[in-house]
Image (tube, rainbow, N blue to C red):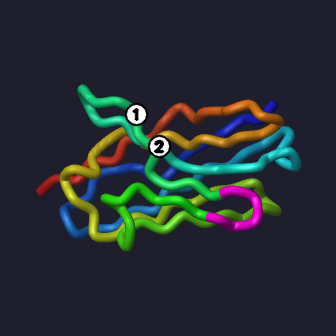
Amino acid sequence: QVQLVESGGGSVQPGGSLRLSCAASGSIFSITGMGWYRQAPGKQREQVAFIISGGTTNYRVSVKGRFTISTDNAKGTVYLQMNSLKPEDTAVYYCNVVAHYTSYWGKGTLVTVSS
């Protein structure tokens, strides 16, 4: 079992930055991938960025060059540095971790980008 605790959401003006964190606990030694998804009101949940064991990353096209995913494997933590935020980035952001072929989800943290 893996438990996830997210932090770092909030409100920011367009062009601003936020850093999301997700700390995993439990069977972190079995984690094979960590990442972030988001869900805007009235829309489906979509993958934002993901990193797998070995360091390979994948980004949604709309966030490439603006968002950076990173991990601290010793701490079982994944980060999402979000720069040059746009109003269309407004959503609830969910941490996702894959361990033992099982997908675990955080409760979500709200990011609001508005002037």
Left or right, 90 with reference to 70: left
Residue 84 occupies quadrant: bottom left
Instruction: Determine the secondary structure under disc 1.
Output: loop
Residue 10 magenta-drawn?
Answer: no
Q: CA distance from mark 2 to mark 1?
A: 7 Å
**What label sits on residue 37 in the rendered view?**
2
Q: Position of residue 6 (x, y in %)?
A: 56, 45
Q: Earlier in the sequence, mark 2 or mark 1?
A: 2
Q: Residue at x 53, y 59 (%)?
A: 58
Q: Position of residue 60 (x, y in %)?
A: 40, 55
Q: Amino acid at mark 1?
A: Arg
Q: Is residue 54 magenta?
A: yes
Q: Is residue 3 left or right of residue 37?
A: right
Residue kind at label 2, given as amino acid type: Tyr
> Which label is found at residue 45?
1
User: Which mark, residue 102?
Assistant: none
The stretch in magenta equals 52-56
Q: Of helix, strand and loop, which mostly describes the magenta segment? A: loop
**Closer to the camera, 9 or 78?**
78
